[in-house]
Image (spheres, rainbow, N blue to C red):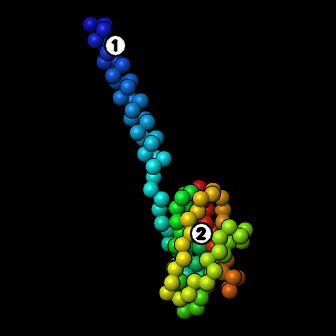
Amino acid sequence: MVRRFLSVTVVLLACTAVTVALADGAQRRRKPATHSVTISGMQFTPSTVTVRAGDTVVWINKDIVAHTATSSAGSFDSRVIPPEKSWKFTFKAKGNNSYVCTYHPTMKGVVTVQ
C-alpha cells in the first residue's frame, strides 16, 4: 500500500513538472506580432505603440504626401514612404523609441518595446 502511494505521488509530481515546463516553453515560443501605424492627416495613428521584442511595426502612408518614420536616436529610418506605400521595421531591443517625420517635424510617435 505504501509503495503504491509513493508511486502515485511520484507520477503526480512528474506531471506537475511537465505542465510547468510546457507553460514556460509556450511563453518563449510566442510568435512575433505585426502592429500597424497609419499615417493620415499629417499624424501617426496610433502615436504610441507598445510591442514586444521581435515584433514588427508597419507604417502605412494614407496621406497625399510623402512622410518618413525616423528614429530620434538613429536606430531606424524609413527614408521616404510615398503615398499609398508602407514600410516596416522589426524591433529587437527593449526600450522607448521616439520617432518623427523628417519632412514634418510636428509629426511624432513612440514605439515602446517590452
Please state if 7 lies on the left or on the right of 50 as rendered: left
- Give the foreground label among 2 and 1: 1
Give coordinates of residue 3: x percent, y percent. Answer: 30, 8
- For image coordinates 52% across by 61% down, the residue present is 55
Residue placed most toward the observer, 53 or 98: 53
- For image coordinates 57% across by 83% down, the residue present is 81
Give coordinates of residue 75: x percent, y percent. Answer: 68, 67
Are there few (<14), some (14-19), or many (20+) residues within 10 Å of tag 2? Answer: some
Q: Residue furthest right?
A: 73
Q: How many labels does the image show?
A: 2
Please state if 59 lies on the left or on the right of 70 as rendered: left
Q: Which amino acid does label 2 sit on?
A: Thr
Q: Residue furthest bottom?
A: 64
Which label is found at residue 48?
2
Give coordinates of residue 43: x percent, y percent. Answer: 59, 82
Secondary element type, mark 2:
strand
Residue placed most toward the observer, 99 or 106: 99
Give coordinates of residue 113: x percent, y percent. Answer: 60, 59
Which label is found at residue 93?
none
N-terminal of the two: label 2 or label 1?
1
> Which image quadrant for residue 4?
top left
Disc 2 from disc 1: Cα separation? 55 Å
Secondary element type, mark 1:
helix
> Which image quadrant for residue 78?
bottom right
Tell me, yes or no, if residue 40 can be seen here.
no
Q: Name the residue under label 1.
A: 6
- For image coordinates 52% across by 66% down, the residue present is 56
- For image coordinates 51% across by 84% down, the residue present is 85
Q: What residue type is labelled 1?
A: Leu
Whether residues under marks 2 and 1 lie with C-beta atoms below 8 angstroms apart, the answer is no
